[in-house]
Image: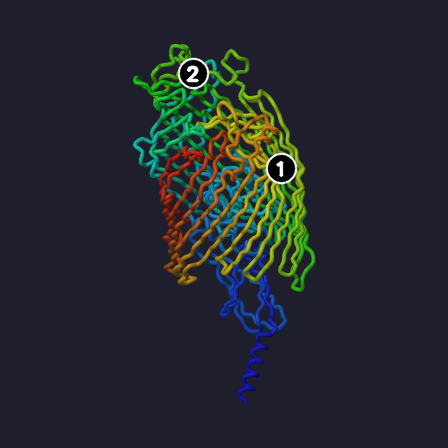
């Protein structure tokens, strides 16, 4: 009898497990936006430990055994809603639910009541569901980690580091030339003539919804790609009306510790002032003052942002968002040292035992976004972004200067001011035609104006009587004026066609046809005016802090000094005609993608073809006038595969072919003098071809957790590098250094909740970690360079790692979050750590070893307090370890320190109030 009971029990158990399930399907919509689909909302079956998120179209599906259940629908910043359902065998229940913000009050509308792509959990879900291999960081995560600009934001993702002192990034060890930047999928011009990409640190996170990093190429991207594409998604407001004001202050310990923080007179605090080249500069002295003035190095920021939405007709919705922000900062480098060109024996032509720098930077950002949803099938967005940045600095080097200060009694001073204006205008549209067709399009017109108005260099030798200006070479003392104007028109258009449905009514296939257009024009002009004392005045004692006593109209009229350009003095025809170059880049591209889902395997096969034309014309001191044209037709296949190992695990594969173009200035015979080196272009430079392979496993234990591991490899034909060529002044140029190069490595990403006391109102401790290991190698072929260019080079080694590539990158953070008083108060504290190992700055030549930037570790502390529903407080401490920044030349007979300094720590305090 007992045996029969056991058999019957087992039978019923088996039948219970084998019971056919029913399905709950539906769409969650946004009540505040005329019931537009709400992606990434939460759908929970109460009491069953079952939870899903809606997809990009607001849809969800739950397979569950028959029974009576209660569904709970929620979204951050929205009121929860519930629905009672009865599920039967082999039946599908349709449950559509609309939720909205209602009376829910938020502390920070910009983060919590905006589009869901700002949420960390939403971006992880998007990463999980997407076919492409992509990483993103949203406004929520950027705020938590205390980053204030896009350059800092992307370094919080795996495999990316930032070049010291710039907004340039390295993706998997590949620098500026191998990466690309877009805003809302459309390209943006660079504000630096030497760089392909715009400095990412000029983009404040106030205008950013999220930043996506594509490390795996797909055919919708431009083919000039090997490291990664950074796509900045600008804010688009979708909630109720708000106004928010931010004010803050910050200080750098090095700057505050100086007895006298001084800069050149003439530039105001706004960052909009500028200096123009004087009229008749060779026949009269009308240049700006060289006097210095003291500053109080307390920085600050102020900003205002607002948004609202309005119903238009029965289905339409108009959303408006705007923000305006101004910030500045004072920084100082103290107790530094620097060397110029060093030979293999360690002897330098410049050896400065003292190097110091004071700098003042400003950023003014104004952005407007207007979104018009005509109906559920059609929407249009217009974005306009204006950014003005300025950088003013004074650099002073003291020590040995060959032939000028052989006793170590030299002083080199450089006064620098740069002002950049960027204007971006974009019009974007999306249109749905039935359930099968979706059209996307976008056009943009962007302009950049970059000015270096009146960069000044003076070199002194200190004698017993005082300081004497160097008179060895005409350019020793000069004033340099440079202007860049760049405009760019870009367009994209694509049509998606979905085909073949499964039994549940979901499409299995999609074909995308697309077209891209890009036309970029750059005009650069520069003039350098050299000042040299005339015979009889070469040993005049001067005051470095009051050079106006020497350089003034009276002394010039009396013949104390002369002014010349590289073409000569005022007796030479067209002596003031500037150096210049013009560049034009034209790209026409078409692409097709075919995506199909085979059960658990989804495959995307893409093909892109591009017709590329790059023209450069120049008129410079090196080759008078000249021109060059590079043309290429590129066929770029790509393959992306995603295999769903389980509901929470994916395995991904990516393969593609791409290319790397040289930049305008790299191919123009244009010479640019820096303090420690001189750079010159190479008209014989040509493109590289790149082959890319990625394999990634990822696991999503919870909606806000992820574990992933990626292995990757890159093979580059004819890699481009910046090297020192054989010349009397050890000039730096750009060449295809060998036939091949490759990079291989692995990346680990981990986001994990350590402790969660109460999901709704309590204490939460979370952590993030990403680690990258990279190995790179490339051939160095002297004969190839001699055969293909007019330059000669003698490499110290026959192979080298890639410049900018660190073997090991580590980013880690721990965040404590605490809420109380029914969520009216909260505290978020984050400790963020970053480390990168040694990386090559420049490849060794002529018996000299490689220039290597030594390993650096940084530590930041970010605290954000919600005082009440309107008022917030932030306290941030950066660079707490204040590591020594070092660059060495690794010669065979021992390392030589080329550059050392410390940046100091920065502390900031800010308040925000939201109406």
Instruction: Give whichever of 777, 814 is nearer the camera.
Output: 777
Q: Which mark is residue 10?
A: none
Quadrant containing the N terminus is bottom right
Q: Nearer the viewer, residue 312 or 235?
A: 235
Q: CA distance from mark 2 to mark 1?
A: 46 Å
Which image quadrant for residue 624? top right
Pair 2/1: label in front:
2
Q: From this view, report whether residue 93 is shown above or below residue 788.
A: below
Q: Is residue 631 above or below residue 211?
A: above
* Residue 379 location (% of width, % of height): 60, 49
The disc, 2 or 1, on the residue closer to the chain's N-terminal end is 1
- SS at badge 2: strand
Is 266 in front, or is 691? 691
Q: Position of residue 244 (x, y in %)?
A: 43, 47
Q: Which label was assigned to residue 518?
A: 1
Q: Secondary structure at mark 1?
A: strand
The answer to whether residue 778 is visible is yes
Q: Which residue is mark 2?
A: 532
Q: Nearer the viewer, residue 364 or 632?
A: 632
């Amino acid at each position: 009898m007992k045996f029969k009971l056991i058999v019957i029990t087992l039978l019923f158990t088996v039948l219970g497990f084998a019971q056919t399930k029913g399905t709950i399907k539906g769409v969650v919509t946004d009540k505040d936006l005329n019931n537009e689909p709400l992606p990434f909302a939460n759908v929970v079956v109460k009491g069953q430990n079952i939870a899903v998120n809606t997809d990009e179209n607001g849809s969800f599906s739950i397979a569950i055994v028959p029974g009576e259940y209660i569904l709970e629908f929620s979204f951050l910043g929205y009121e929860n809603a519930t629905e009672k359902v009865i599920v039967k065998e082999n039946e599908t229940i349709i449950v559509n639910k609309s939720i909205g913000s209602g009376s829910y009050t938020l502390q920070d509308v910009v983060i919590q009541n905006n589009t869901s792509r700002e949420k960390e959990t939403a971006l992880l879900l998007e990463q999980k569901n997407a076919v492409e291999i992509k990483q993103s960081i949203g406004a929520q995560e950027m705020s938590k980690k205390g980053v204030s600009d896009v350059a800092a934001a992307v370094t919080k993702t795996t495999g990316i580091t930032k070049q010291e002192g710039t907004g340039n990034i390295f993706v998997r060890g590949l620098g500026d030339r191998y990466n690309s930047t877009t805003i809302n999928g459309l390209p943006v011009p660079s504000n630096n003539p030497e760089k392909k990409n715009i400095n990412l640190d000029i983009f404040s996170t106030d205008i950013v919804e999220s930043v996506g990093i594509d490390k795996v190429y797909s055919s919708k991207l431009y083919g000039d790609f090997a490291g990664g594409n950074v796509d900045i998604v600008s804010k688009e407001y979708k909630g109720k009306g708000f106004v928010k004001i931010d004010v803050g202050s910050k200080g750098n310990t090095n700057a505050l510790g100086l007895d006298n923080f001084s800069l050149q007179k003439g530039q105001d605090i706004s960052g909009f002032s500028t200096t123009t080249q004087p009229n008749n500069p060779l026949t009269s002295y009308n240049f700006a003052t060289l006097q210095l003035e003291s500053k109080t190095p307390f920085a600050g920021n102020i900003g205002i942002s607002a948004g609202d939405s309005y119903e238009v007709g029965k289905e339409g919705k108009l959303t408006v968002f705007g923000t305006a922000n101004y910030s500045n900062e004072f920084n100082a480098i103290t107790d530094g040292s620097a060397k110029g060109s060093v030979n293999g024996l360690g002897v330098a032509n410049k050896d400065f035992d003292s190097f110091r720098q004071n700098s003042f930077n400003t950023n003014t950002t104004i952005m407007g976004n207007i979104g018009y949803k005509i109906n559920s099938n059609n929407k249009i967005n217009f974005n306009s972004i204006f950014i003005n940045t300025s950088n003013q600095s004074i650099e002073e080097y003291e020590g040995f200067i060959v032939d000028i200060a052989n006793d170590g009694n030299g002083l080199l001073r450089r006064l620098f001011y740069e002002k950049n204006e960027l204007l971006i205008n974009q019009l974007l549209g999306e249109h749905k035609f039935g359930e099968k067709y979706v059209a996307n399009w976008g056009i943009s017109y962007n302009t950049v104006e970059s000015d270096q108005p009146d960069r000044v260099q003076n070199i002194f030798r200190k004698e017993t009587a005082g300081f004497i200006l160097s008179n060895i070479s005409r350019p020793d003392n000069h004033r340099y004026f440079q202007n860049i104007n760049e405009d760019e028109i870009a367009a994209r258009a694509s049509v998606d066609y979905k085909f073949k449905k499964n039994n549940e009514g979901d499409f299995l296939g999609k074909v995308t046809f697309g077209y891209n257009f890009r036309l970029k024009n750059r005009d650069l002009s520069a003039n350098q005016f050299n000042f040299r004392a005339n015979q009889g005045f070469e040993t005049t004692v001067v005051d470095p802090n009051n050079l106006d006593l020497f350089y003034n109209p009276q002394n010039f009229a009396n013949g104390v000094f002369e002014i010349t350009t590289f073409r000569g003095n005022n007796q030479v025809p067209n002596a003031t005609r500037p150096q210049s170059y013009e560049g034009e880049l034209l790209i026409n591209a078409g692409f097709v993608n075919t995506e199909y889902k085979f059960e658990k395997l989804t495959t995307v096969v893409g093909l892109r073809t591009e017709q590329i034309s790059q023209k450069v014309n120049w008129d410079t001191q090196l080759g008078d006038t000249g021109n060059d044209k590079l043309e290429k037709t590129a066929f770029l296949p790509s393959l992306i595969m995603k295999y769903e190992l389980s509901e929470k695990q994916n395995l991904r594969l990516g393969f593609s072919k791409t290319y790397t173009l040289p930049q305008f200035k790299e191919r123009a015979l244009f010479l640019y003098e820096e303090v420690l080196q001189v750079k010159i272009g190479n008209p014989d430079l040509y493109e590289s071809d790149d082959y890319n392979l990625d394999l990634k496993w990822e696991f999503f234990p919870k909606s806000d957790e992820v574990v992933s591991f990626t292995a990757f490899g890159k093979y580059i034909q004819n890699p481009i590098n910046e090297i020192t060529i054989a010349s009397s002044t050890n000039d730096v140029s750009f060449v295809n250094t060998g036939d091949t190069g490759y990079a291989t490595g692995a990346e680990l990403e981990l986001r994990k909740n350590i402790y969660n006391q109460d999901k709704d109102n309590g204490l939460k401790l979370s952590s993030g970690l990403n680690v990258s290991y990279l190995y790179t190698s490339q051939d160095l072929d002297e004969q190839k360079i001699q055969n293909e260019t007019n330059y000669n080079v003698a490499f110290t080694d026959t192979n080298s790692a890639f410049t900018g590539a660190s073997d090991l990158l580590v980013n880690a953070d721990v965040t404590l979050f605490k809420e109380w008083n029914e969520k009216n108060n909260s505290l978020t504290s984050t400790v963020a750590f970053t480390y990168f190992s040694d990386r090559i700055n420049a490849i060794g030549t002529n018996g000299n070893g490689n220039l290597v930037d030594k390993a650096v570790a940084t530590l930041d502390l970010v605290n954000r307090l919600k005082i009440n529903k309107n008022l917030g407080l932030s306290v941030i401490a950066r660079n707490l370890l204040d590591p020594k920044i070092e660059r060495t030349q690794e010669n065979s007979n021992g390392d030589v320190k080329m550059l050392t300094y410390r940046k100091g720590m920065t502390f900031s305090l800010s308040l925000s109030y939201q109406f």
